[in-house]
Image (tube, coloured by chain):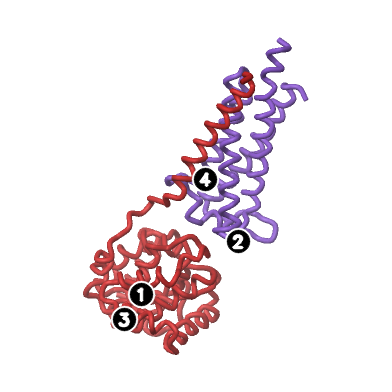
Chain colours: A purple, B red
């Protein structure tokens, strides 16, 4: 796959992640129940657990910021933009893995929206890393 | 090392640092509410009549019952953000009596915590115990309410005979307190916690619609009733 296509894929994934994070941010601030298959009880448990905030900032807001930054970095051209997108996506995927561990083994509840976000962030990390690994090829071709 | 390997290493290294910091902050817990000293909790209720799970003047015309699970995070928010102001503004002056119906439906930790509240109520010290347990609330169903946790909490409640409270947890009296709370919750139709009901002069309890779980939200709901009740 060419870098142009990977770049478009990264932007699409980041925008999808932005939508998910924006919805979870809305649920948090509107004190609403998340729409989930089989009811929103598990999402509510995750969202109201002590791990739902990081240094007082809702994790959903951090997700919103992260996806936004990855989208911007993917829109920009150049090695530094690709490096920034890869770093953020790899960091996001790592943190998503930690949050999934908490859901499974500590909070004992799975939020479908959080799972969707984790899948999107992992896909973003793969795409962003693929773009990073293609830099040499691009250089060689150029 | 090739340029691509170096770039990947930089990205991975920075990502690991980012995740490490995030996890360290997460494990550090929330700093939203500074923990109150047990003595401060004792001062909050000092001099206010307590009988069983009821706090306040027995002659107060208005009574509000809170239905709560000790693992419920919204109940903990209410305990931290609203209860101190409610106690000072309404309970201490004698215009309101508070009752706490302790439920245990969120999971195994709820039962142990509820039993300690029930046991403390036998010593007329349910409310400081409730405040202390909410303040130390852990992640829901994480197994945080261990024997050690409960023993330490009981020992820290000002005035509580911890040894007696721990022994009373499995007593028939505590069984009855928990059973009565669950029965009453079913009877009035409690669908979540915290839920509030008010009653005046022994009348049937009526749902109290609290707009937000802070002192202002409670005051907005209670002020017209306190005015009406004198």
Disc 2 from disc 3: Cα separation: 35 Å
Task: Determine crowd level at label 2: few under 14, some 14-19, many 20+ residues with C-alpha closer than 10 A.
Answer: some
Q: State which tag comes first along the sequence, 3 or 1.
A: 1
Label placed on residue A41: 2
Q: Quadrant of residue B155?
A: bottom left
Kindly give the residue lying farthest to the front in the view shown: B1
- Label 4 close to label 2 by CB (< 8 Å): no
Name the residue nearer the viewer: B160 or A19.
Answer: B160
Residue that badge 3 annotates:
B124
Q: In the rendered view of the protein, which quadrant contains the N terminus of chain A? A: top right
Query: Which mark is in front, 3 or 1?
Result: 3
Task: Determine crowd level at label 3: few under 14, some 14-19, many 20+ residues with C-alpha closer than 10 A.
Answer: some
Residue that badge 4 annotates:
A59
Q: Position of residue A54 (x, y in %)?
A: 46, 46
Q: Are marks 3 and 1 on the same chain?
A: yes
Name the residue nearer the viewer: B4 or A121.
Answer: B4
Q: Chain of mark 3?
A: B
Task: Determine crowd level at label 1: few under 14, some 14-19, many 20+ residues with C-alpha closer than 10 A.
Answer: many
Disc 4 from disc 2: Cα separation: 18 Å
Query: Which mark is in front, 1 or 4?
Result: 4
Q: Quadrant of residue B47?
A: bottom left
Q: Are marks 4 and 3 on the same chain?
A: no
Q: State which tag comes first along the sequence, 4 or 2.
A: 2
- Label 4 close to label 3 by CB (< 8 Å): no
Disc 3 from disc 1: Cα separation: 13 Å
Disc 2 from disc 1: Cα separation: 29 Å
Residue that badge 1 annotates:
B98
Q: Are marks 2 and 3 on the same chain?
A: no
Task: Determine crowd level at label 4: few under 14, some 14-19, many 20+ residues with C-alpha closer than 10 A.
Answer: many
Kindly give the residue lying farthest to the top in the view shown: A142
Which type of secondary structure does the marked residue at label 1 adopt?
Answer: strand
């Amino acid at each position: 796959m060419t870098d142009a296509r990977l770049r478009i894929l990264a932007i699409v994934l980041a925008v999808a992640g932005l939508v998910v994070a924006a919805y979870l941010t809305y649920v948090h601030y509107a004190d609403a129940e998340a729409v989930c298959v089989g009811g929103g009880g598990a999402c509510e448990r995750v969202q109201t657990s002590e791990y739902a905030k990081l240094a007082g900032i809702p994790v959903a807001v951090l997700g919103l910021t992260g996806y936004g930054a990855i989208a911007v970095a993917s829109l920009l051209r150049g090695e530094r933009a690709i490096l920034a997108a890869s770093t953020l996506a790899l960091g996001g995927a790592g943190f998503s893995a930690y949050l999934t561990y908490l859901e499974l083994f500590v909070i004992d509840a799975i939020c479908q929206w959080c799972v969707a976000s984790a899948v999107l962030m992992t896909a973003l990390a793969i795409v962003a890393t693929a773009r990073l690994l293609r830099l040499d090829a691009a250089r060689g071709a150029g | 090392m090739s340029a691509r390997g170096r770039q990947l290493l930089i990205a991975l290294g920075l990502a690991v640092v980012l995740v490490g910091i995030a996890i360290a902050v997460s494990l550090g817990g929330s700093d939203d509410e500074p923990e109150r000293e047990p003595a401060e909790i004792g001062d909050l209720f000092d001099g206010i009549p307590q009988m069983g799970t009821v706090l306040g003047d027995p002659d107060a015309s208005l009574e509000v019952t809170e239905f709560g699970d000790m693992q419920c995070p919204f109940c903990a928010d209410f305990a931290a953000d609203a209860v101190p102001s409610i106690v000072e503004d309404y309970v201490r002056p004698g215009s309101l009596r508070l009752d706490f119906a302790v439920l245990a439906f969120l999971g195994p930790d709820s039962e142990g915590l509820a039993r300690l509240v029930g046991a403390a109520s036998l010593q007329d010290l349910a409310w400081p115990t409730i405040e202390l347990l909410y303040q130390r609330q852990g992640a829901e169903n994480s197994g945080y309410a261990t024997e050690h946790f409960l023993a330490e909490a009981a020992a820290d409640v000002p005035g509580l005979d911890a040894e007696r409270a721990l022994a009373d947890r499995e007593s028939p009296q505590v069984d009855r307190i928990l059973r009565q709370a669950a029965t009453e919750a079913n009877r009035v139709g409690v669908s979540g916690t915290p839920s509030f009901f008010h009653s005046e002069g022994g009348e049937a309890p009526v749902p109290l619609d609290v707009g937000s779980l802070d002192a202002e939200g409670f005051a907005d709901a209670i002020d017209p009733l306190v005015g009406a009740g004198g």
